[in-house]
Amino acid sequence: MLTTAGSTILICGAGAMGGIELAITAELGSGDQTAFTVIDFSATDGDVWAFSWSWTGVATTHDMLLAIESIGLTYEWTDWGSGFFVDNFEWGADAGNPDLYWAHSLGSIADSDPQWSPAWSGVDATMLSDGMISGWYNGFNEDFSPIPPSLPLIPAPSVLLMTALLALPVTRRRRR
């Protein structure tokens, strides 16, 4: 289930006990299906950015990245003959390091937690599905397994309320 609320998207996995809210940088496209791209620049001391893209029919991760490129994402890729693979990303002041390579993970939400798996094919062959997260991290683990990205989350209202209450000054009156 996808619910648009201003500039946030509530993602609830099928059968999930709850949901999470991604801080969406931009919403693009139109259609009856929506997928997300999360690009994590923390390996180069940058931020994490999330985008949503809607479409109808059949689409690939490459299609989604080209759409995001139209609003300012620098998306560099190479066709290696066996598929299109990402060389680097840049968004605003954040830039990846092409020497680290980009790990691509595919995510879904189950019980309010992201479930990640490696994307084993090029972006031109990675088919999108409704609610899917295409996650990118600039680097790999020592065993070359992908590092999933962090998700830019919007805190739940109860967390915001508790934070606000803790920030209030506590004053004590003395009775005379």
Image (cartoon, grey):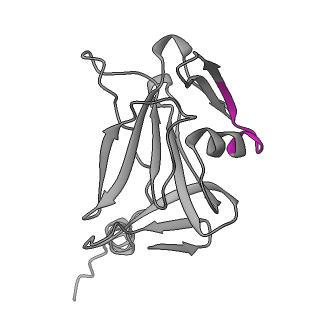
In the rendered structure, the answer to whether residue 51 lies left or right of residue 42 reads right
- Estimate the x, y position of residue 60 in percent, counting from the top left: 57, 44
In the rendered structure, the answer to whether residue 39 lies left or right of residue 94 reads left
Q: How many marks?
A: 0
In the rendered structure, the answer to whether residue 132 lies left or right of residue 33 reads left
Residue sitting at x 47%, y 58%: 22
Residue 152 shows in the view? no
Residue sitting at x 39%, y 30%: 120
Residue 48 shows in the view? yes
- Estimate the x, y position of residue 76 in percent, counting from the top left: 66, 24
User: Picture quarter containing residue 112?
Assistant: bottom left
In this view, which residue lies farthest toward the bottom? 176
Of residues 77 and 90, which is closer to you in this image?
Answer: 77
- Estimate the x, y position of residue 49 in percent, counting from the top left: 55, 44
Magenta region includes residue 74: yes
Residue sitting at x 65%, y 29%: 90
Of residues 86 and 45, which is closer to you in this image?
Answer: 86
- Estimate the x, y position of residue 129 in percent, counting from the top left: 48, 56
Image position of 174 with respect to 127: above or below: below
In this view, which residue lies farthest toward the top? 99
Q: Which residues make up the magenta segment?
A: 68-76
Residue sitting at x 27%, y 70%: 16
Quadrant in the picture for the C terminus: bottom left
Image position of 115 with respect to 123: above or below: below
Image position of 56 with respect to 88: above or below: below
Of residues 33 and 107, which is closer to you in this image?
Answer: 33
Magenta region includes residue 134: no
Of residues 86 and 167, which is closer to you in this image?
Answer: 86
Quadrant in the picture for the N terminus: bottom left
User: Picture quarter containing residue 118?
Assistant: top left
